[in-house]
Image: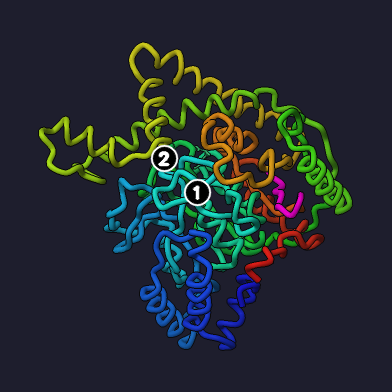
């Protein structure tokens, strides 16, 4: 059951081969068997899931079901889920029961999907390894001594071990694509504004975007169909029609123009990962694509720019976690200042504190022009590079991450080494462009992701380009031996 695609599951549910309750129970059993070794879920909502599954079965019987009705999914614990703890991987929100649903959750509920639970993540989505979570490290199902990537590492581990048929993630600097790469998944970060951010706990509001983490491009397209769309409650949501993302999946890619930025293949890229990516590009050429070397000359500015912009925005967004309006409150505060200081001091972890301090510094009077303003100017240069590149090519390809999954603990004492895990993904967020990671092969038994970046709102093309590759290869169908 757990190797079926979403459309196969949908067909089986509609034909009555099995019920949503049976399917949901199958996944709940897998979670019960494997979650203790992976730590992929923070919260499992078994009773609610079965209740949703019963309602889905009714819709299926009454022939009022939609394509995804009755299919279970896992939500990253950054999405507010009414009546269910929404921790964002933090101690700060350990006891936060969301009073409303995020738009994404609302839409997927309305489609009749079944929520299995909330997946582990780096604290407030800050991290590339899922080691900053208050709920403990998540293990990579391909090698449990290694990280699954982050910050959507719980969704990635759950998907790789087939503990859910599909999951949601969010990507501020790479958090869908990098864990997808490390766990052999298809992950899509759409164009900024494509999916509503309402009810998605904000990290860096000008960069955050939700997206699907899936077994295949076809599955990702089906979920994106439901996730995307305008929402008046998110002021940066874009009012633009949602195409049927499955409609053009099989279109020919004959003549597709692929750009390969030389900056994505330089120093720091593991040679075996580079060889795997080059082999994937050859497959594209055999499918009729043409390849062109391009340059994104300001790429080297992306990590430093991000680490001014993202901390600046998070320092502002996290100011609401003060023990009064939201979040952990310390015991017996002496006065208001003591309440703020101890609540925040106790509630936040080390990485989050580091970001708040950097961000507050960068925004403070006297430094604003030197750091924040400068970073915004660099951000424009990075966007302009892409604009220039898309005059000549249809998509840009390269590695998603410089290496395969690294060992647990390996980069914990060196924040900058950790930040470099996102060196190829961050510029996409700074420009607001859509990007994907798809399975492209293995190095020493560990997955390698190919990144595909598209022009604004070109998600349908990205999915088409990914799907054609997945019809020609079977990397995406490989699953780790212990989780068959
Ligand atoms: N790893 C990056 C960070 O720590 C990106 C995280 C994300 O995309 N949420 O900021």
Residue 460 part of the magenta-drawn span = no
In magenta, the rendered stretch is 443-452
2 and 1 marks in contact (CB < 8 Å): yes
Residue 262, percent from left and from top = 77, 30
Label 2: which secondary element: loop
- Quadrant location of the N terminus? bottom right
Q: Give the image quarter of residue 237.
A: top left
Calculate the distance from the C-alpha at mark 2 to the C-alpha at mark 1. Answer: 10 Å
Badge 2 crowding class, 10 Å Cα cut-off, few under 14, some 14 to 19, many 20 or more, is many
Residue 407, percent from left and from top = 61, 45
Residue at left offset 45%, top offset 71%: 114
Residue 199, percent from left and from top = 36, 51
Q: How many marks?
A: 2
Q: Is residue 31 above or below residue 63?
A: above
Residue 473, percent from left and from top = 80, 60
Residue extending furthest toward the top: 366
Badge 1 crowding class, 10 Å Cα cut-off, few under 14, some 14 to 19, many 20 or more, is many
Along the viewing direction, whichever of 301 and 478 lies nearer the viewer: 478
Q: Give the image quarter of residue 268.
A: top right
Label 1: which secondary element: strand
Classify residue 383 as left or right of residue 249: left
- For residue 170, which numbered disc appears in the image? 1
Residue 219 in view = yes
Residue extending furthest toward the left: 334
Q: Main secondary structure of the magenta part?
A: strand
Which of disc 1 and disc 2 is earlier in sequence? 1
Mark 1: is the Cβ under 8 angstroms from ligand 1? yes
Along the viewing direction, whichever of 29 and 174 lies nearer the viewer: 29
Mark 2: is the Cβ under 8 angstroms from ligand 1? yes
Classify residue 11 as left or right of residue 250: left
- For residue 203, which numbered disc appears in the image? 2
């Amino acid at each position: 059951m757990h190797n079926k695609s979403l459309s196969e599951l949908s067909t089986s549910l509609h034909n009555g081969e099995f019920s949503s309750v049976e399917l949901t129970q199958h996944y709940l059993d897998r979670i019960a068997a494997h979650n203790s070794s992976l730590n992929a879920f923070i919260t499992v909502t078994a009773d609610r899931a079965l209740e949703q599954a019963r309602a889905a079965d009714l819709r299926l019987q009454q022939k009022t079901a939609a394509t995804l009705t009755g299919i279970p999914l896992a939500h990253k614990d950054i999405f507010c889920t009414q009546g269910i703890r929404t921790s964002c991987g933090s101690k700060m929100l350990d006891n936060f029961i969301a009073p409303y649903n995020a738009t994404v959750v609302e839409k997927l509920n309305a489609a009749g999907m079944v929520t299995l639970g909330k997946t582990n993540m780096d604290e407030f989505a800050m991290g590339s390894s899922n080691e900053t979570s208050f709920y403990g490290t998540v293990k990579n199902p391909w090698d449990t001594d290694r990280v699954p990537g982050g910050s959507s590492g719980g969704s990635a581990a759950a998907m790789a071990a087939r503990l859910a048929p599909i999951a949601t993630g969010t990507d501020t600097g790479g958090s869908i694509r990098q864990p997808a790469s490390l766990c052999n998944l298809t992950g899509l970060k759409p164009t900024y504004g494509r999916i509503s951010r309402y009810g998605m706990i904000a990290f860096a509001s000008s960069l955050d975007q939700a997206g699907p983490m899936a077994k295949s491009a076809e599955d990702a397209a089906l979920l994106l169909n439901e996730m995307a769309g305008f929402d008046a409650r998110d002021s940066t949501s874009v009012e633009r029609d949602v195409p049927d993302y499955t409609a053009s999946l099989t279109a020919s890619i004959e003549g597709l123009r692929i750009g390969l930025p030389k900056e994505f293949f330089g120093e720091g890229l593991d040679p075996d990962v580079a060889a795997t990516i080059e082999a994937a590009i050859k497959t594209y050429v055999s499918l009729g694509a043409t390849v062109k070397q391009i340059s994104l000359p300001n790429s080297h500015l992306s990590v430093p720019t991000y680490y001014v912009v993202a901390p600046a925005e998070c320092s502002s967004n996290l100011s609401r976690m003060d023990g009064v309006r939201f979040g952990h409150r310390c015991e017996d505060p002496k006065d208001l200042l003591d309440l703020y200081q101890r609540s925040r001091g106790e509630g936040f972890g080390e990485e989050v504190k580091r970001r708040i301090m950097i961000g507050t510094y960068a925004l403070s009077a006297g430094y604003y022009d030197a750091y924040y303003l400068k970073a915004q100017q660099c951000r424009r240069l990075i966007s302009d590079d892409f604009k220039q590149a898309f005059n000549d090519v249809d998509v840009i390809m390269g590695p998603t991450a410089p290496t395969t999954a690294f060992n647990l603990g390996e980069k914990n004492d060196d924040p900058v080494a950790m930040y470099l895990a996102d060196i190829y993904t961050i510029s996409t967020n700074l420009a607001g462009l859509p990007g994907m990671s798809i399975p492209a092969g293995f190095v020493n038994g560990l997955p390698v992701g190919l990144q595909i970046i598209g022009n604004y709102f070109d998600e349908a093309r990205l999915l088409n380009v990914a799907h054609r590759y997945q019809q020609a290869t079977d990397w995406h169908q490989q699953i780790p031996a212990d989780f068959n």
